[in-house]
Amino acid sequence: MLLSIVQTINSYLSDYILVILLISVGLWFTIKTRFVQIRCFGEGMRKVFGNLSLNGKKHHSGMSSFQALATAIAAQVGTGNIVGASGAILTGGPGAIFWMWIIAFFGMATIYAEATLAQQTRKTDKNGRIQGGPVYYITTAFKGRFGRFLAGFFAVAIILALGFFGCMVQSNSIGSTFETAFGIPSWVVGVVLVIICGVIFLGGVRRLASVTEKIVPVMAALFLLGGLVVLIARIQYVPATFGMIFKYAFQPQAIIGGGIGYALKTAISQGAKRGLFSNEAGMGSTPHAHALANVENPHDQGVVAMIGVFIDTFVVLTLNALVIICTLYTSDGILAAGAIPDTITKANLAQTAFGSVFGANAGAMFVAVCLFFFAFSTVLSWNLFGKINMSYLFGEKSTKIYTVIALVFIFLGTVASNDLVWELSDMFNQLMVIPNAIALFALTGMVVKSAQRRAADTLQK
């Protein structure tokens, strides 16, 4: 009964309210900032890769700009990049990837707004620690009871969505893939995961920043290397792969069946939903990391945040999609005709794709290792985001209780998971978006001023 209710709520949220709301936010800020994702893309790339370091300076409070980006990317690049992309392609066809690209393009403007607002509204507590995120810019946008209600609603939703249920879902992916690929009992994986996470959680922001700035480049390089090997092995099919993405973006009925109207709606909605919740632009999660960055002005972190969406969707997620399409959907692939065998699901689609080149066992192991890095880094970042909101609601002392509960959920995820947990995670995940998006619209002026001020400074130089 409860499961069906939650599923119904999720379907209305994802199919209608959130897709329209988040696309509107992206379009709005793209226009208002005069296409900041194009104008300032080069600046963002220079700020990220011009000062790339795996051993950033220690800060009295907060993080370096790259550490904040690494923490944000750790949250963005999770199981959704592998499982989410697989689900979008299975349901919406290869053309869903095109719509993911469109959503990500506008999402870069949205995340610019989130990051600059997080910087402008962050607070420093009595112990000198920086605190920032949507709850702070929500209460800046709306004073009084309404602002406190929206902020409180957001805080509760993100604690449940990411801190508890979300981490449980991520650890479930780690446990199940390791048991399948290596034969290690999932409860053993759970114990090891809890110990490692506990050590990092107790080390606070500094230790987490130190871990994410090292693990994110390594996990990205590993996955990119494996993906490129597959694409090189299937190089003759790569042109056709891109052709299928563009063709089936507008003619999806040819591969997923149904009438043109139904098929096109499915392709667009799958691309939009999976894209939005892969790069997390507009969800209100990554601003917590960007608020902690020690930068000269908010615009600097805004353009860095845009690169996070670019890396998540246009690099990591796209590479996974290309591997799947060029191995399984091209003329000699098992899904070429559009019929999906019962043995193929979104959970094993990537393993099947990599396995077609690496061999079944090696493919399963490669995806399991990548999923470990992706999911583990996401757990670290999501725990931090939940902790910041726990502190906002109940004070700093409550974070110790929060950490214990979070570790319990992480372990439970490796030994027991069900559809209700996944659906609850999705529901609270989606509910976060509503107060966040409302505040973004309300604070448009602050975002525009940040972009204009930086443009004026550049002209003066």
Image: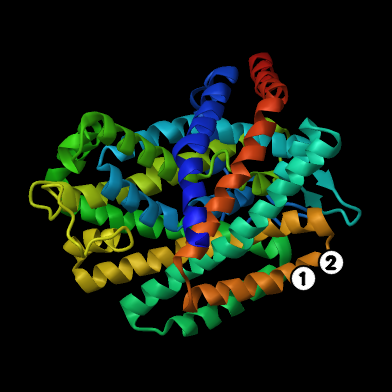
Q: Residues within 10 Å of mark 1 (few under 14, many from 20)?
A: some
Residue nearer the viewer, 79 or 301: 79
CB contact under 8 Å: marks 2 and 1: yes
Most distant residue in the right direction: 126
Q: Which residue is mark 2?
A: 397
- How many marks can you see? 2
Circle on res. 368: none
Amino acid found under the numbered disc labelled 2:
Lys
Up/down of 197 relative to 245, above or below? below
Image location of residue 324, percent across then percent down? 24, 52
Residue 242 can be seen, yes or no = yes
Image location of residue 116, percent across then percent down? 68, 34
Q: Residues within 10 Å of mark 2 (few under 14, many from 20)?
A: few
Report helix, strand or loop for mark 1: helix
Image location of residue 364, percent across then percent down? 28, 69
Up/down of 295 relative to 218, above or below? above
Residue nearer the viewer, 426 or 333: 426
Report helix, strand or loop for mark 2: loop
- Which residue is painted at 22% across and 30% down in the image? 260
Circle on res. 400: 1
- Which residue is painted at 24% across and 56% down in the image? 229
- Which residue is painted at 71% across and 21% down in the image? 445
Amino acid found under the numbered disc labelled 1:
Lys
Task: Indicate the quadrant where residue 161 lies.
Answer: bottom right
Q: Image check: 312 left or right of 256?
A: right
Task: Indicate the quadrant where residue 110 lies.
Answer: top right
